[in-house]
Amino acid sequence: MTSMTPSVLIPIAPGTNRNAELAIAFEAAGAVTAQVPLEAIRTGETKLADHQILALPGGFSYGDALGAGRLLGLDLSGWFADQMNEAVEREMPIIGICNGFQALVKAGLLPGNQLASLTENNNGRFECRWVTLSPRSSRSVWTSELNEDLRCPIAHGEGRFVGDDAAQLVAADQVAFAYVDASGGPANGSYPANPNGSDVDIAGVTDASGLILGLMPHPEDHVFRRQDPLRARRNAEAGTGSCLGLFSAGVKAAAS
Amino acid sequence: MSDTHTTRTVGSAGEMADRAFVIGPGRDDRSSDGPKAKAHMLGIAVDRIVEFRVGHIRSNLTTEETARLADRLLIEPVGQWWVDRDGHQPEAGVIVVETGLRPGVTDREGAELVRAAAQFGLPIEAGAVAKRWFIEGQLSPAETELLIERVLHNDVIERWAYKALPPSHADQGAVDGTTAFITLTGLGYDGLVELSQQRRLGLTGDEMVVIQEWFGEQGREPTDAELEMLAQTWSEHCSHKTFRAVIETDDGEIDGLLKTYLRGATDAIDAPWVESAFVDNAGIVHFDDTYDLALKAETHNHPSALEPFGGANTGVGGVVRDILGVSAQPIAITDILCFGPEDLPPADVPEGVLHPQRIRSGVIAGVGDYGNKIGVPNIGGSILHDPSYTTTPLVFAGCIGLLPRGSNPTNAQAGDFIVVLGGAVGRDGVGGATFSSQSMTTDTADVAGSSVQIGDPVVEKGLIDLVLAAREMGLYTAITDCGAGGLSSAVGEMAEVLGAEVDLETVPRKYPGLAPWEVWLSEAQERMVLAVPDPGPLLELAKKWQVEAAVIGKFTGDGRLQVKTGGVNFIDLNTTFLHDGRPRLRLKASLADSPRLPRSEASEDEAMSAEEILLAILAHPSVRSNEEVIRTYDHEILGGTVIRPYGGVEQDGPADGTVIVPPGTATMGDVGPVAGAVVGIGSAILIGRHDCEAMAWAAVDEAVRNAVVGGADPDQLSLLDNFAWGNPTHPETLGQLVAACKGCHDAALAQGAPYVSGKDSLFNEFVVEDGAGGKTRDPVTPTLIITAVGITPDVDKVPATGVVSAGNDVWLIGPAAGNLGASYHDEVIGTDLGGPVPAPNPDAVGHHRQLFAAIRQGLVVSAHDLSDGGLAVAAAEWAFAGRLGLELQLEDSQVGADAIMFGEGPGRYLVEVAPDQQDRFASLVPAADRVGSVTDSGELQLTANGQDLRVGLESVGSAFKNTAITSEVGQ
């Protein structure tokens, strides 16, 4: 089989809630998807090995009890450690968005080479607003071919990325996305372009292999033009949202 | 007290011990709504308040093992630390206080701690979290306690202690309560009334007599559970007895407000798009050829007054559950919140009442928390202010659902099993229905404390996934939610025709110690009851979705409701008596006519320039931007949001109607027109102070205007009504309600828009006893909220929020001037200058249709309706949203310039149209006049009868966004 349609496994932990639109985004990018309760993976009814992409959606897994993404992170690094290791060895593209990113970080899979965390926004509140993202990493299979800024919403209370040495991630080409202002200029930590106060404006990171991507904003909410709040003010002739390419890149990487 | 826990040796494995960890660093919140700011508002000169978290673990693990658990579960790897509580001492002079949930209150973190520890291989017996406060400053003990009671904790659900508080899991293990019989035999009328009051049943003397007679016929006394169940089923909250009552007026009898006016309008309109109205948990209307929308709007006022976070939280949970109760997927939430003045001096807050700021921040956090966690976008609403909302704050929460046509089964059969899904039963939420149906007094907070609950949105999210999966598989024959009244109302309703048998011992509970009637009546947000022919597959599915499920009985077909515990019935009621036995209420209404005085001139003192008036209205608490609030709600989730509550260049201009594409209804990609659901909301509380019938017309018109600007077809709208009123046993209060209902009826009929569901909340008044046997009433200002839901055939043609291009023409639909009676103009100058309130305009319906026709043709670039503050305010908001300018000239020699600038009335819109579409637009919208154009001046220039109003966008922005002038405006 030379060109297959990759299947995306989208696990739903108790409290996961952005699974449906993530599935739609991947389907719009040409994949098939399986939204499955985490318990079905735990019991072995569903196997990660039967899929080509793992996508961890946003939400409040386990109610964000004891910290956002922490308990799902424990699942990944504990209960599912074998399956995760096997997936990494198999070079499976993995994406975690918002709560999924928090879980990947708390499981130690991202950034992978230093301690990091996603913690309370600088303004201490949950916040939902559109942001502009500049794709930065040439290392990530998800972002290396993106050449325009992405626009999509954030919706989180604990999205401030802090690392032991965030500057080192820039040097290592592991910053997948940086927050920028509406015209593409650096946010330099200023609100609201950098909405949560993340170190060096980091919105998303990749691991060293380039296969695992995590980001706080929600690209799955801008894959159609109708989702764009500024559509009346932009003369975009294309019918798609600015983030569809991200999902297409992951699907392409999984299919090759 | 707590020392016994913390000083115990925890080193030896095998012995059960408690260990308390303090997690740092502490949070020193200096924000304007943080604890320190709130303390200063109370006049407490505190220097610093630092908040730490405490984690409690009860286990038989070793010290080293519990430390490992703390490392992994309690703290972040970067930037956080833990220390044993004994080792966490402040510097001298710092006051240490701990606050935590009362035992039995939903504690998700504690439960997750237990679950995660087990998964981690280090099982613990119990877990809990709490807060630890370091308070710095020269505070007297009285001040400290005031600070704790008013700012740091809420006694309804929490408790506190100096230095160290025992964990909330510490004192469980009570013994189950038993059933008691209540003697009715021999009680006279007064005795029955007294009994009803004593037990806070909320039953009238006449109702108690009927109950006494029925049990007399059975030859026995009722059990406490039967009496509570009757009180709940017959409560205002559940049976809407005021809306069903016979009302005597000077103009003759009204055969029920619901039947005559609300359902009356719906029946008369007989709209083909209505699948069901007023029958189930929610109304159901068509979306397209395949899908229906389920619509519901609820009130959750009484609980929100006592415990703002929990009250609002469960208000959202409740309305979402109503939608799930008709097998629909919840796809959007709305909320309208009503608060007292934020700057109310603390000394003016009545005893037993929380400060409006405390209520506001709690309610907003509660609405956001539930919606964000359950994953349903909050797409609209508003925040209203009135002095009467200080003692009776209001929370209206609405929800829209989506379901394939005909997919909600409603045919339970005798022999079907009763399955309860969701959260286990606790003592929280006992008596919610009866408490919500009575007026509040200074001691309500103490007496009704257990009526308030904390929601658990994660459990409800699981319920949604499970129920929708079960629906697809056809696993149930009927479904309803456990609302106020818990299993009593849910099973009671479902068994109305068939009858049922329930074994209470099979009902999952959070902890022992509950009396049977408490288990039967406790409300939990996150619980559904289903009729299931074969429970096996459903129980299997529930396991997969990690939702608790239990078979608790079955439907019998004998028309009796029997509930037993320990093999003995403690409820044995005939369902006909339960549901139809209540004597119909008769009430008197006085339809007072208070004529308006002719309009007078403002005095010298009151005179303000047009610019000052405009900015004052923009900064008025009921008008100004709520963007900061909306940003704490997720309005994007599900990916269907097209028009958001705030839009424009910087996403800070107010939209009118909001629009979503229901998930799964559109084709993949952007091919062909995509239809959207549109929500418009209307209210007119200023008019309601003078004329409730006119208020209803104005509220319906505003809801319709908002929907039409959102692109909705005005000839396919469905309405929801929400009333919040005072005590209807007062004839003048009921008279206002009658007037409002009549207005609702007439306005809906004129528009051809049926009501499909609604909710009334009565007894919203605060009663203070003056000590001399007298009572003072403080009823809520008559509050009617109308929600209009419609369909836009093509979301690409929906007008933008805010003006888009300089050089485009501006058209005004409707008359140049409006009314100044009961207007925001008079509100901000602080004087009622008289004059008529806005009257129904028979042309308004035509205006809505004409605008829609132009939108349909793609001629409308942007639009904004004229609402609070009239033309000047609408133009200012519209220009600000687009970061452009407007130049407008209007003339009407019959009125003054102020009636053109600030007059209010129905059926008016500002519309932006490209110059080359002028002829097409003019022919489709004969009610429109060209009044000016969009400019790039960054200024609103409005000339009315030769008088100029010029305001820059910066002034507009700082007034509207409340950054500069609100303190000068005041109220």
Image (spheres, rainbow, N blue to C red):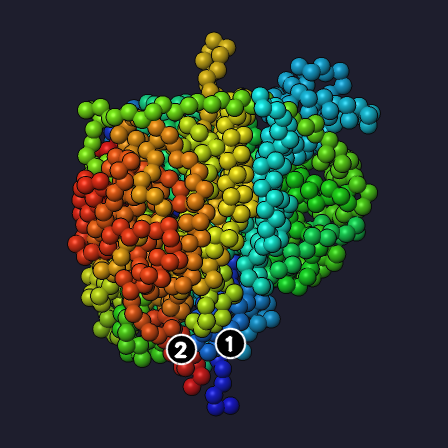
Chain at numbered mark 1? A
Give whichever of discs 1 and 2 has the lower sequence position: 1
Q: Nearer the viewer, residue B758 or B227?
A: B758
Q: Is mark 2 on a helix, strand or loop?
A: helix
- The image shows residue B470, relative to residue A136, as above or below, that is above
- The image shows residue A95, relative to residue B217, as above or below, that is below
Q: Do labels 1 and 2 share a chain?
A: yes
Q: Which amino acid does label 1 sit on?
A: Val
Q: Which residue lies furthest to the bottom in this view?
A: A2
As drawn, the label of residue A248 is 2
Left or right: residue B147 compared with residue B428: left
- Name the residue rendered at 38%, 63% in the picture: B858
Chain at numbered mark 2? A
Q: Residue beneath label 1, please? A: A32
Find residue B614 and report its horizontal and vertical position in percent: 24, 39
Q: Which amino acid does label 2 sit on?
A: Ser
Is the C-beta separation of discs 1 and 2 under 8 Å? no
Q: Specify whether residue B773 is in view.
A: yes
Find residue B85 and report its horizontal and vertical position in percent: 38, 42
- Name the residue rendered at 54%, 43% in the picture: B749
Q: What element carries label 1?
A: strand
